[in-house]
Amino acid sequence: MEMPSTTPKTVEEIFKDYAGRRAALVRALAHDVDEFYGLCDPDKENLCLYGHPNETWEVVLPVEEVPPELPEPALGINFARDGMNRKDWLSLVAVHSDSWLLSVAFYLGSRLKQNERKRLFSLMNDLPTVFEVVTEWKPVKEKPSVDSGSRSQGSAKRSNDGQVKSNPKLARRSIEEDVGEHSKTLCGSCGENSTDEFWIGCDICERWYHGKCVNITPAKADCIQRYKCSFCCMKKCRQ
């Protein structure tokens, strides 16, 4: 992985390093998508997406140093490529890329004072995340709280006779838990919190997803004994 000629030390230098790496990752995931997709061959070994301060990117094997000179990005992003919808896979890589950018910035800023770290994060937070750029996601304004009994929520559906019918996949949880849960929960795929749609929860990490975002219908969910989301599938591939 390319290292800057001199290690960034001040808030401004670290932010410049962050902005360059971020621009590189945005280019890979939002502009050079076909090239990036082609490089992530699942038949190859564990691959990582690196963004460099000079705004260039590369897909390569992780460094062999232990510990590495800088925190490493997500390992094995190529393994999940063909097992997911392309859009969802790019969103997944974007989320991990954002996490890596933060870890590198705060690794470099470990010796900053408290007020300097706060200023660094403020500068970084003024830029859209890679995930937001890749998915064209916009923050949802918080909706006024409503009485939980005034509408159906999440996987709880109401029939014409007014009886509550829970999706069999989520029957382990009470209706009361489901009603309150999705009013503030964001879908792990699209980042939206619309509550008038079918939801499904991962039995491993307990993230929630809109069924349409993960290509799961209520009928399919009825046949799934144990749902594992793409995040958890990717973790298994890395082991």
Image: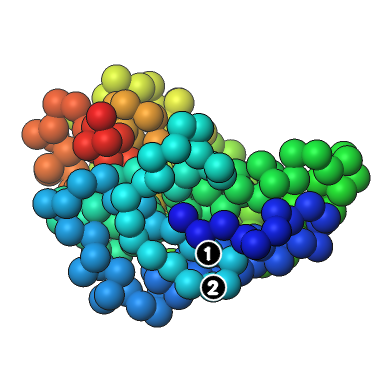
- Tell me whether the residue at label 2 lies in contact with that at label 1, contact meaning CB atoms closer than 8 angstroms: yes
Q: Which residue is mark 2?
A: 55
Pick out the residue farthest to the left.
223
Residue at 58% from the left image edge and 39% from the top image edge:
147
For the point 17% across and 58% down, the residue is 41
Q: Is residue 102 left or right of residue 159?
A: right
The residue located at (13%, 32%) in the rendering is 224
Q: Residue at x 30, y 69 (%)?
A: 36
Inspect the image, locate mark 2, and give the three-letter code of the amino acid beneath it: Glu
Residue 92 % position (x, y): 37, 53
Q: Residue 26: percent from the left, percent from the top?
A: 48, 70
User: Which x, y percent locates residue 213?
Assistant: 30, 55
The residue pinned by badge 1 equals 52
Question: Residue farthest to the front?
Answer: 5
- How far apart are labels 2 and 1 at the CA level? 6 Å
- Relative placement, left or right, of 131 versus 128 is left
Q: Is residue 202 above or below residue 26?
A: above
